[in-house]
Image (cartoon, coloured by chain):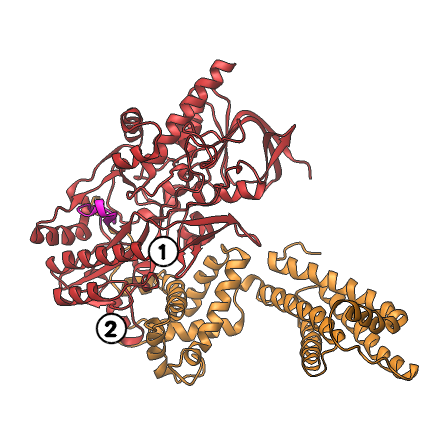
Chain colours: A orange, B red
C-alpha cells in the first residue's frame, strides 16, 4: 500500500512495479525468444546503419549457456523490484542490486561498442542506461522519506553550519550547539518544497561538498577538510569568480542561517527582540 | 471518491490583490460569487517565527526561483490574502507615462478607482515615528547629500512598528486583502473556499463551464458562467498553458517582468535596531526616470544575515553587529523579460528570467548611489551584494565599484513583483486579454491579477493590480446585470 508514503516514494514504488513487470516479462522472453534477439538486431543494423554485424554463436549450446545467465539475472531483478514495490521503506536497501546490475551492463556495453562497434552493444547501453538513471534518480529522491535529507547531506550541512558559525568568537552560541533544533526547522522548510526543488537542493548540497576540489581552491571535500580550514573554503567559494559556486554557497548558507537564527537562543545572541515594537 | 459540486454565477480563483478585489466587486453588485484559494486563512496571532511563516504562507516556503544566470528568488504568497499577506504593504499609483503606454484606459479614467482602492485599504503616508532606525539612518544620508528620502504610503491601520510585514503582521495592522476586501466580499454574500486548489477547466461544447480541483476533503467541481483567474503572474499563465487555453496570441507566459532587486546592508557604529519599525518605510525616487527605485528593507536576523559575506569568526562578528545594521533594496524597472511554463513533477510553475546587461548597469548605478547615501549617513562599511566589490568603506571605494565591469551574474537577485505574463491590450494577436481583462479567445474567461500589466511598472504594483481588477470586475458585473 502507498498510504502515508511521500510523493517521491510513491513515484519510486510505481517505477519498481513497472520494473518488476518488465523484468518478469524478460524471463520467458530471453528463455524462449533470446535466440532471435541478435539476428533481429543484425537485421536492423544491416538495413539502417553502416555498422558491422554481430557474429552469431557457432554452437547453439554456447548461446544457451549465456541465456541461462541472462534469465537468472532477470529473475533476480524481478524478485528485488517486486519486494521493493511491496514495501518501499522496508526493502529499499535492495535497490543497489538493480543499480549495480544496470550500471555494470551499461558501462560494459558502452566499452564493447567503443571497441567493436556492434549495434547490439549500443542497443544494450541505450536500454539499460536509462533504466539505471531513472532508478537511481527516483531512489535518490525517495530515500530520505520524511527526513528530506539523507545522513550524508546532514553531515555536509552540519559541517557548513559549523564553519559559518563556530562555537567561539563574537558570541558563545555556535551552530553545532543548536544543530538539532536548526535541522528540525530546516526540515519544516524542506517539507514545503516541490519534489523537483528538493532534488535540486540536495544535489546542490552534494556538489557543494566537492566544490572546493572542483573550483580549485582546495584539495579536500568540505567534509574531509580539517575543521579549521572549512571557513576559508566556504569564503573562497562564496567569492569565487564563477557565479555557480557563489550561488550554490549562498543558497545553502541562506537556508542554514534562516534555520539557525530562527532559534530564540541564536537570535537573542545577536540582539534581536521578537517582541520589539515602536508603539505599545 | 465523488466530487463535491458547487454552482455559482462567477468563480474567482485567488484572493490576492486581484482576486479579492474582483470577488468583492462582483459580490457587491449582486453576482453570486464563489472564491477559491489554494492556501488557507491565517490569523495575526498565528505568525510566530520566520520559518513557520514562510512554510505556511509562501509557495515552496519562499524558495520559488526563476531559472537564469544567476537564478532569481521570487517569493510569492499562498494564503487567503495572497501575496498581500506577505508583502511590505507599500502602496504606489503607477507612473502616468506607464499607464499611457498601455494604450488602454487613461490615468484620469483610473483615478476614481485609485482613490477607492486607497480608501478601502487605508493607504496613507507613514508617521515618521514608525520609520524606525532603518529609515532614520538613510534619511540622514539623504539630508547630507541633499537627496530627498521620502516616507512611503502604506496600507496599515494602527501599525505598531513590529517590523515583520513580510512574515505576516502579528497584530493584523497590515490591511492585506484578507483584512479588507475578503471580509467585504463575504459580507456581500460571496462564498470562500480556502485550501482548494484548481487543477483543470471543465469544458462543455467548446466553452469553459467551470473548474475541477481538489482539497483536503477530496475532489471538487465548480460550475460557473464566468471564470476569473487571479492566481498571480506566475501561476495563472502556467495554468492556462497547461490547459492550452486563451493562447491564440502565443503571448501567455511570455513577457515576464519581475522588478529585479538587490539588497544592500550598511553597518553603523551606533545602534540602529532596524528591526523596530516599518522595514520598508522610506524610498528614494530621484532616479525613477532611469528605472531605479531605492526602498528600505529589513528582516529578522535569519534572512538578513544570510545575505552577508564571509564564514567563520569574521562572519560571526558581522552577525553580532545585527543591531548596528540597516538595509535597503535597489529595485530596477526591468527591460529584460522572461517566461513562465507549466511546472514539472509537482512544481506549480517554471519561471525563466535572464537579467540583461542594461539592467545590470542600472543595478550597479543604484547600488553605488545607495552606498553613497549610507556612507553620508555615517555607515562605516556597506555590504553591496555586488560580487566584484562586496564591501565598500568610503566614496573612493564607490568610485571603484562603479568602474568595475558589470555582468548580470555579479548580483544576488531577488524579485517580488512578477508581471506581464498575460498582457492586456486591444490587439488579439499581441495580447491575452482586452482592457476589460476579458480573454480575447474565451468570452467567459477573465484574468485579473498582476499578469495583465503589460510592462514593468518600476513601483510596487498592488494598488495598480487592485485598481485594474476593480474596474474590470465592475464592468463585468454591469454587463452581467444587463444580460440577465
Say whether residue B279 is magenta. yes
Q: In this view of the protein, which residue sits in the foreground, B300 or A41? A: A41
* In the depicted structure, whether residue B107 falls above or below residue B247: above
Using the numbered discs, state the Cα–Cα distance from disc 1 to disc 2 in whole angstroms. 38 Å
Q: Residues within 10 Å of mark 1 (few under 14, many from 20)?
A: many
Give the residue drawn at x 13%, y 67%: B396
Q: In this view of the protein, which residue sits in the foreground, A205 or A37? A: A37
Identify the mark at residue B355; answer none if there is no mark: 1
Q: Is residue B447 left or right of residue B284?
A: right
How many marks can you see?
2
> On the image, numbered disc 2 is attached to which residue?
A170
Q: Secondary structure at mark 2?
A: loop
Q: In this view of the protein, which residue sits in the foreground, B230 or B440? A: B440
Residue under mark 2: which chain is it in? A
The magenta-colored residue range is B277-294
Give the residue drawn at x 67%, y 71%: A129
Say whether residue B113 is magenta. no
Would you say residue A171 is visible in this rendering?
no
Amino acid at each position: 500500500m502507498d498510504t502515508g508514503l511521500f510523493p517521491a516514494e510513491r513515484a519510486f514504488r510505481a517505477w519498481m512495479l513497472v520494473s518488476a513487470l518488465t523484468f518478469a516479462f524478460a524471463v520467458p522472453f530471453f528463455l524462449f525468444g533470446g535466440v532471435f534477439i541478435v539476428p533481429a538486431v543484425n537485421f536492423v543494423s544491416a538495413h539502417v546503419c553502416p555498422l558491422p554485424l554481430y557474429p552469431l554463436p557457432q554452437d547453439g549450446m554456447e548461446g544457451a549457456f549465456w541465456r541461462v545467465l541472462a534469465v537468472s539475472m532477470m529473475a533476480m531483478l524481478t524478485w528485488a523490484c517486486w519486494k521493493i514495490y511491496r514495501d518501499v521503506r522496508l526493502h529499499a536497501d535492495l535497490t543497489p542490486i538493480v543499480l549495480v546490475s544496470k550500471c555494470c551492463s551499461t558501462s560494459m556495453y558502452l566499452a564493447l561498442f567503443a571497441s567493436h562497434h556492434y549495434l547490439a552493444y549500443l542497443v544494450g547501453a541505450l536500454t539499460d542506461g536509462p533504466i539505471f538513471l531513472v532508478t537511481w534518480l527516483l531512489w535518490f529522491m525517495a530515500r530520505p522519506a520524511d527526513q528530506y535529507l539523507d545522513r550524508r547531506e546532514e553531515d555536509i550541512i552540519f559541517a557548513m553550519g559549523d564553519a559559518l558559525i563556530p562555537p567561539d568568537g563574537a558570541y558563545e552560541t555556535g551552530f553545532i550547539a543548536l544543530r538539532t533544533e536548526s535541522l528540525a526547522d530546516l526540515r519544516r522548510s524542506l517539507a514545503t518544497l516541490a519534489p523537483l526543488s528538493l532534488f535540486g537542493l540536495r544535489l546542490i548540497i552534494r556538489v557543494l561538498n566537492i566544490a572546493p576540489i572542483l573550483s580549485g581552491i582546495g584539495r579536500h571535500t568540505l567534509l574531509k577538510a580539517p575543521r579549521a580550514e572549512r571557513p576559508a573554503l566556504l569564503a573562497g567559494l562564496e567569492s569565487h569568480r564563477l557565479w555557480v559556486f557563489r550561488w550554490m554557497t549562498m543558497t545553502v548558507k541562506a537556508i542554514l542561517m534562516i534555520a539557525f537564527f530562527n532559534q530564540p537562543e541564536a537570535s537573542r545572541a545577536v540582539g534581536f527582540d521578537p517582541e520589539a515594537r515602536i508603539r505599545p | 471518491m465523488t466530487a463535491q459540486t458547487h454552482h455559482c454565477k462567477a468563480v474567482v480563483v485567488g484572493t490576492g490583490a486581484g482576486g479579492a478585489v474582483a470577488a468583492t466587486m462582483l459580490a457587491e453588485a449582486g453576482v453570486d460569487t464563489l472564491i477559491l484559494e489554494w492556501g488557507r486563512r491565517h490569523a495575526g496571532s498565528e505568525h510566530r517565527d520566520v520559518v513557520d511563516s514562510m512554510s505556511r504562507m509562501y509557495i515552496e516556503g519562499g524558495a520559488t526561483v526563476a531559472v537564469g544566470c544567476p537564478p532569481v528568488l521570487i517569493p510569492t504568497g499562498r494564503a487567503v490574502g495572497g501575496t498581500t499577506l506577505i508583502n511590505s504593504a507599500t502602496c504606489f499609483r503607477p507612473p502616468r507615462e506607464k499607464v499611457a503606454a498601455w494604450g488602454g484606459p487613461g490615468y484620469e479614467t483610473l483615478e476614481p478607482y485609485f482613490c477607492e482602492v486607497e480608501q478601502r485599504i487605508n493607504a496613507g503616508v507613514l508617521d515618521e515615528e514608525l520609520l524606525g532606525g532603518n529609515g532614520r539612518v538613510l534619511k540622514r544620508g539623504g539630508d547630507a547629500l541633499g537627496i530627498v528620502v521620502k516616507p512611503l504610503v502604506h496600507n496599515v491601520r494602527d501599525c505598531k512598528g513590529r517590523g515583520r510585514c513580510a512574515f505576516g503582521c502579528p497584530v493584523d495592522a497590515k490591511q492585506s486583502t484578507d483584512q479588507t476586501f475578503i471580509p467585504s466580499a463575504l459580507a456581500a454574500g460571496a462564498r470562500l473556499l480556502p485550501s482548494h486548489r484548481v487543477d483543470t477547466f471543465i469544458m462543455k461544447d467548446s466553452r469553459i463551464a467551470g473548474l475541477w480541483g481538489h482539497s483536503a476533503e477530496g475532489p471538487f467541481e465548480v460550475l460557473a458562467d464566468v471564470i476569473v483567474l487571479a492566481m498571480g503572474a506566475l501561476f495563472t499563465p502556467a495554468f492556462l498553458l497547461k490547459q492550452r487555453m486563451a493562447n491564440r496570441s502565443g503571448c501567455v507566459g511570455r513577457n515576464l517582468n519581475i522588478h529585479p532587486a538587490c539588497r544592500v546592508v550598511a553597518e553603523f557604529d551606533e545602534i540602529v535596531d532596524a528591526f523596530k519599525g516599518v522595514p520598508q518605510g522610506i524610498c528614494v525616487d530621484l532616479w525613477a526616470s532611469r528605472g531605479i527605485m531605492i526602498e528600505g528593507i529589513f528582516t529578522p536576523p535569519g534572512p538578513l544575515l544570510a545575505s552577508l559575506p564571509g564564514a567563520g569568526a569574521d562572519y560571526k562578528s558581522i552577525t553580532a553587529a545585527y543591531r548596528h545594521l540597516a538595509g535597503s533594496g535597489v529595485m530596477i524597472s526591468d527591460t529584460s523579460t522572461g517566461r513562465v511554463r507549466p511546472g514539472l513533477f509537482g512544481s506549480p510553475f517554471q519561471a525563466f528570467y535572464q537579467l540583461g546587461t542594461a539592467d545590470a548597469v542600472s543595478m550597479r548605478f543604484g547600488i553605488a548611489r545607495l552606498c553613497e547615501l549610507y556612507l553620508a549617513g555615517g555607515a562605516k562599511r556597506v555590504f553591496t551584494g555586488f560580487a566584484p566589490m562586496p564591501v565598500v568603506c568610503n566614496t573612493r571605494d564607490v568610485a571603484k565599484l562603479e568602474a568595475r565591469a558589470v555582468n548580470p551574474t555579479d548580483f544576488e537577485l531577488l524579485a517580488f513583483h512578477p508581471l506581464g505574463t498575460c498582457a492586456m491590450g486591444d490587439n488579439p494577436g499581441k495580447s491575452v486579454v482586452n482592457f476589460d481583462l476579458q480573454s480575447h479567445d474565451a468570452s467567459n474567461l477573465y484574468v485579473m491579477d498582476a499578469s495583465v500589466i503589460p510592462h514593468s511598472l518600476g513601483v510596487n504594483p498592488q494598488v495598480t493590480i487592485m485598481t485594474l481588477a476593480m474596474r474590470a470586475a465592475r464592468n463585468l458585473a454591469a454587463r452581467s446585470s444587463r444580460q440577465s
